[in-house]
Every structure is written in C-alpha cells, then in structure tokens.
Amino acid sequence: MIKVFGHYFHRRTVLQVVTEAILIGLVSACSLWLQRGPTAQTSDVMAEAVFMGALVALAFAGVNGALGLYEYSRTFAKGVMRTRAVLAWGVSCCVAFVLVVLLQLDEGYNLVATFAMLAITMSLVMIWRELSVETLPHSVTVQRVLIYGAGKRAKSVAESLQNSDPNVQVVGFFASPNESEIAVPEVQRVVPGRSLTDVVRDHDVEEIVVALTERRGGSMPMRELLDCKVQGVRVVDIARHFEQKLGQIRLDAMSAGYLIFGEGFNQGLIRSLIKRCFDILGALVLILLSLPIMLVTALAIRLDSPGPILYRQERVGLHGRIFHVVKFRSMRTDAEKDGVPQWAQAGDSRITRVGRVIRKVRIDELPQLFSVLKGDMSLVGPRPERQYFVDQLTRDIPFYAVRHSVKPGVTGWAQVRYHYAGSLSDTTEKLQYDLYYVKNNSLFLDLVILFETVGVVLTGKGAQ
C-alpha cells in the first residue's frame, strides 16, 4: 500500500493511474504540438500542449476513479466492470471533446484529428487494462501474504483479503504457541516446528499480518519478525492492515492506544480554513449546476403527494451541537405518526414514488448544500444523525462520539463505501469508515470521496 496525502492506495492502483495518465497526456500533447507545425515557437506550443494533455489525463483518471475502475475486489463481476468501462470510455470522450473545444485558442488545431487521437488512445488503454489481467505473469500480479495467528482475528483477516483483493494469496497461518483458541482448519496452518523466517523464505512471503487475539506472554517472536522486516518483508498489525486495505478503523481489531498514539486526527487551523474555503466554493458551484434539478424535483414532489416540499429535522453536528438539516421530502407526512424515530429500510413502504427516485440518485440531499454555506455542514464528512439515535449509538458502540469531532457532510467516506444504515450492525460498520475519515481526513481525501460520490449517483449504489 502507498500513502498519498494521508490516504492509502494499492501500489497497483497508483502505478495504473500514473501510467495511463502519462500515456494519454503524452498523446494529447504530441498531437497538439505536431499540428501546429515546425514554424511555431516550440516552447510556447509545447507548454500549451502539455497543459491540455494534463487536463485530459486528469479528467480520464477522475472518470475512471468515480466509476470504480481502479478498485480491486472479488465482489465485482466481470460483466459489471466491463459495463462501467464502456460508460467510462464514453464519458471520458465527452469530457475530452469539451476540453478540446474550450481550450482551442486558434485555428492551428484540427479538432477532428485531436479528438480522434484521444478516443483511440483511451480505447487502447481500456483494452490493455482488460488484457493485462490475463496476460501479466502470475508472479507479478500476486502478492503472497502470511498471517501470524490462527484464531478468530486471523480468520477475519484472511476473509477480508480474499474479498477485497483478488491478487492476494494467503500462503497460510502461522499459529502462535500461546493461542488458546484456534479457528483455522489444520490444513491451512503452517506445519509446527518450523521457524517463522524459514517459512517466509520457503514460501516467498511478501507481507506478514500479525493477527493475534492475545499478545502478552511471549506470543510474538519479536526477533524473527524483525529479521523478516530487515529482509524486505512488510510486517503490519491487524489494525493497520484493515486501515490500509479496507479504509476502516476496525473496532474489533484496535484499541484506544492505536488512535491516541498513531498518526492522524490533524484538525489544525490551516486545515480547517482550507476546508472551509473549499466547502464554500464547492457548494456555490454545485448549487448553480443543480438548480434546474432542484426546481424540477420540487415540482415533482408537489404533484406526487400532499405535504411540504422540504423536510427539516434536528441532527447532531460538530462537537454535539444541534442544527436543522434540510432535505427534499421523500417519505409520506405520516412516516413517523407514532412519534418514534425509525431506521430507513430497503423497500420502505413510507417512501413516496418520487422519493424512491430522488433517494436512489441522492437528489434529496441537494438542499443541504445551503447548510454547507451556512457553516453547519461540510461537503464531505460523516453523515449527521438524529439525537435519538446518537444517544443510543454512543451508549452501544465504542468511540461513536469521535465522529462528531469534524463537521458532518453531505457525502462521506462511509456513504461511498457502504449502503444505507438500517440497523445497529450497519451503523457499526459505517462508523469504522467514519473513524478512518476522521483519522486521515485531508483535502485530497475529500476530492477522492467527491469523485466516488459521482460514481455512486450514476450507479445508484447503496440506495434505499
């Protein structure tokens, strides 16, 4: 894993993004530069061409990232990924065409030739991405991991690796002599009696994940783990493994000390000022762009069911402060006629016909952009919850109150990674993503989340 501005990316993802961006940028730059002819001033033309190429490359990477084409997971069917790839190619071509038209400063460029070259290049990149999965050597694409431990935690690490990364191969489990409870079948465990360093060498292990339930009493061979690390093998504990691989701070794998003494939770004045400026600028742009959509939505709600267009509700914000969140009404006016707050469920009968559509594409959240301008919310952050649920969740879930150390957001890391929370277990799962965001938040991570939110809207992922 590679850490970029506080956020973890797989090294394959970084290499893929950089390689594709450089290729598309070079093609764009060379195409524009060659069209100007040898009589043009080389430095000026090349600078202009490089600028255009960089914009096209960033747009291509952004569209692909938003549609999840840089994610590696066994849960994504090939057909789904190929459909997304075709959609990404179409959107990227449209964006490239707009950029070429808007940035064409004179008649020295051939619009058709430039666009055709970009479309062909992006097509070749998509084809190579598909073929490389099957053609690259197994030794290049597969990462071999050894799990130190054989209990429930070790088993959960193996399951997370198998579900999140198809290129990871778990070579086995190395049971600690002090483990009292074994949850891994014997056939998956390393034969006892061999040293850790010998196992790592014989199996060409690249990474060791320490996943012990109990670490006291000499459970870990510290000297052997150190020998493995100095020989180039990555050694990570279970809490950092989940943080890096899944973008979560897992409650069942970490302690308060991990949060207190680890890196992160940077909430300085400069960071807050930059985020506030970004929120204001972003909210203004999004309000202008979405104003026609909001007007049509308001009319549709008025025609669909009796009741107000907007829905106001008290939510818990920064440092536990109460504020009013405003959304387009998507449920009947008698949704909580007994006065008891209820979780939204899949196929909820309280949702209106228009409400089902606007919730699926998240249009119901658009009025919250005005809360961002007011300062009650941010564009990106943990979703604000009602006081009734906050009291319950703070009592039942450890560290739940930590999410209130940053402003709530219109979208968030948990929203692009997990579906709607309809139960205590769902909320616990989303909290683990929220803790990751609070710990690692940065402007760069905010941009990543905003791009992924576009993909969520386009695919309807996680809507209820």
Image (cartoon, rainbow, N blue to C red):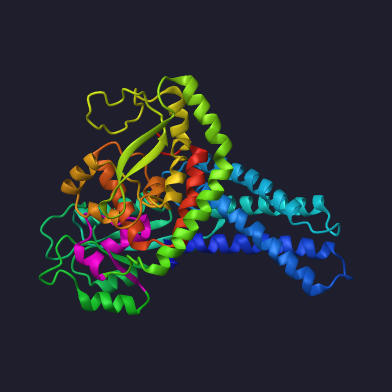
Residue 274 visible in the displayed image? yes
Say which residue appears at 44% left-offset and 67% top-offset.
5
The answer to whether residue 243 is magenta is yes
- In the figure, 351 relative to 25: above or below? above
Instruction: Report the magenta residues as a range.
Output: 233-261
77 or 260: nearer the eye? Answer: 260
Say which residue appears at 49% left-offset and 58% top-offset.
278
Residue 29 horizontal side relative to residue 180, left or right: right
Q: In which quarter of the image is residue 29?
A: bottom right
Say which residue appears at 25% left-offset and 70% top-offset.
261
Say which residue appears at 53% left-offset and 55% top-offset.
281
Residue 247 horizontal side relative to residue 339, left or right: right
The answer to whether residue 310 is magenta is no
Q: Position of residue 13 (x, y in %)?
A: 50, 59
336 or 51: nearer the eye? Answer: 336
Q: In which quarter of the image is residue 290?
A: top right
Residue 204 visible in the displayed image? no
- In the figure, 6 relative to 433: above or below? below
